[in-house]
Image: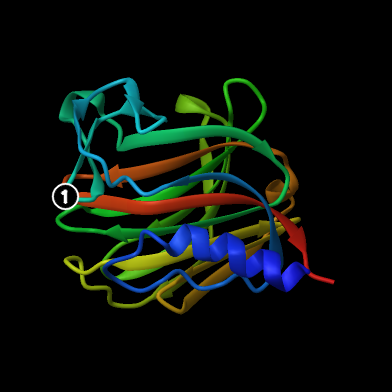
Amino acid sequence: MKITFFIACFAAAFSFTALGQDPAPPTLCTPGALIISTAFDEDAPKTRKASIAGWSAGIGVWWIEKGALHGDEVAEDHHPSSCTWRFEATDLILTAQFRLGTAEHIAFGCRDTVPPNLHLGRTFVTKDAIWVTRMSGISKTTKSEKLAELKTKLDPEAWHSITIEIIGDHYRATVDGHVVEARHERYKDAKGLVALISKGQGAQFKNVSIWHAKPKG
């Protein structure tokens, strides 16, 4: 029963996949209810601080073109671009595909349920490394600590896959089979928001899905 449900969930998420590697199946948990799955395959004009495919473009400029969500940093914002989805979950799985392009880095951020959704943790990806942080606070009170890092080369012009699992205090990010994982009490806190983040210009995202998760066993 669990195996059948798992296959059905991931088949639905990957039905959009055309380029790049499929995200790796989770290893720490099994998927529960699907929270959101967005292909970003319907064109949408450039927007700032507005809805795009149901997501919220909060910082930077975002648009959908040629089957992908584009997010560019805007200099006057003095902050990487950010596009978010609000929900409530304890443990979760996130899968997506991304292309770095000329962006300095992309990141997948997670924030808690404490108004106005304080930072909780983040996965960063550059053409040279993948790392995981634990976070707290918001805006000028933000604090961040790098807990684990893997140096590896990624082609910025190719599509890559990512699977993020946050189960209890355990955080595991898998990018094209490269694994970075860490443990911290902060990760146990309830999650209320996921953000797609881009530092610089040229990053793209597609096939972003989020599930509630259940620990294996």
Number of residues whose C-alpha sits closer than 10 Å to that of mark 1, classed few (under 14), some (14–19) or many (20 or more): few
Q: Position of residue 150 (x, y in %)?
A: 44, 74
Q: Position of residue 207 (x, y in %)?
A: 39, 54
Residue at 31 percent across and 28 percent down: it is 59
When the figure is inspected, residue 84 is found, relative to residue 146, above or below; the finding is above
Camera-side residue of 150 and 44: 44
Q: Which residue is mark 1?
A: 66
Q: Position of residue 213 (x, y in %)?
A: 70, 55
Colour scheme in use:
rainbow
Give residue 178's quadrant in the image.
bottom left
Task: Work out which quarter of the rendered image holds the N terminus and state it.
Answer: bottom right
Q: Position of residue 2 (x, y in %)?
A: 76, 68
Camera-side residue of 140 and 151: 151
Q: Secondary structure at mark 1?
A: loop
User: In the image, 39: left or right of 75?
Assistant: right
Residue at 36 percent across and 33 percent down: it is 53
Task: Work out which quarter of the rendered image holds the C terminus and state it.
Answer: bottom right
Camera-side residue of 95 and 18: 18
User: In the image, 96: left or right of 78?
Assistant: right
When the figure is inspected, residue 67 is found, relative to residue 19, above or below; the finding is above
Give residue 88's quadrant in the image.
top right
Residue at 46 percent across and 26 percent down: it is 139
Give the number of marks: 1
Give residue 51's quadrant in the image.
top left
Query: Label 1 sits on what residue type?
Result: Lys
